[in-house]
Amino acid sequence: MRLIASATLLALAAMAACPASAQDVTAGERSWNKCRACHQLGEGAKNLVGPQLNGLFGRHTGSVEGYSYSTANKNANITWDEAVFADYIKDPRAKIPGTKMVFAGIKNEKEIADLTAFLKQFDKDGKKM
Ligand code: HEC
């Protein structure tokens, strides 16, 4: 009996320490709702008001074919990685002055981490990795 109790405690401790809780994909999907009016993700994603965001991390700014970027975004000359994205999404117009993305930004670090985890699931063809 005591053994079962301690095993349960161990399992609970393991769950609490689980790194998945640091970046929460489900919470990230909720955050993604803020982007959906303008961006698509997944297989067959199309450019809407903004470019599709498949395989964003590792992608170069302004590189989606068939999307008409602003000169500012096209010439920003950055490769999207976690740090750059976090900086950008806090205040897009500060990171890329002249961008035509009209978005106030997300200030909460946890929300940015969750959103990053959500976006990272999609490879360049929109398939979940
Ligand atoms: C009101 C519409 C709108 C919303 C909401 C919006 N975006 Fe954008 N986004 C745009 C537009 C338009 C561009 C193209 C900017 C340009 O060309 O200057 C863009 C560009 C981007 C880029 C650069 C893409 C590239 O290929 O260089 C990223 C990354 C991005 N948005 C992420 C997001 C995320 C993540 C969210 C939600 C948290 C979001 N956007 C919300 C309209 C929007």
Image (cartoon, grey):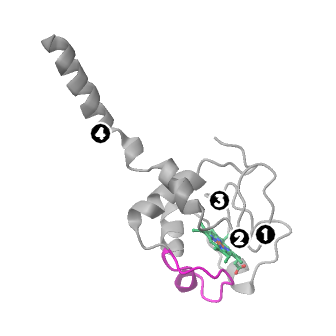
For the record, the magenta segment spans 90-105
Mark 4 or 2, closer to the camera? 2
Task: Tell me which secondary structure the magenta stretch mostly adopts.
Answer: loop
Cα–Cα gap, marks 4 and 2:
36 Å
> Mark 3, mark 4: which one is toward the viewer?
4
Label 3 – label 2 distance at C-alpha: 15 Å
User: How many residues crowd mark 4 within 10 Å: few (<14), some (14–19), many (20+)?
Assistant: few
Magenta stretch: includes residue 93: yes
Mark 3–mark 4 distance (CA, rounded to whole Å): 29 Å
Q: Which residue is mark 4?
A: 17
Q: Is residue 124 left or right of residue 97?
A: right
Residue at image position (18%, 19%) is 5
User: Mark 4 to mark 1: distance in Å?
Assistant: 39 Å
**Mark sitting earlier along the chain (1/2):** 2
Answer whether labels 4 and 1 touch (C-beta < 8 Å): no
Q: Nearer the viewer, mark 3 or mark 2?
A: 2
**Farthest front residue in view:** 1
Is residue 21 in the magenta section?
no
Q: Which residue is mark 3?
A: 56
Residue found at the far left of this picture? 2
Q: Secondary structure at mark 1?
A: loop
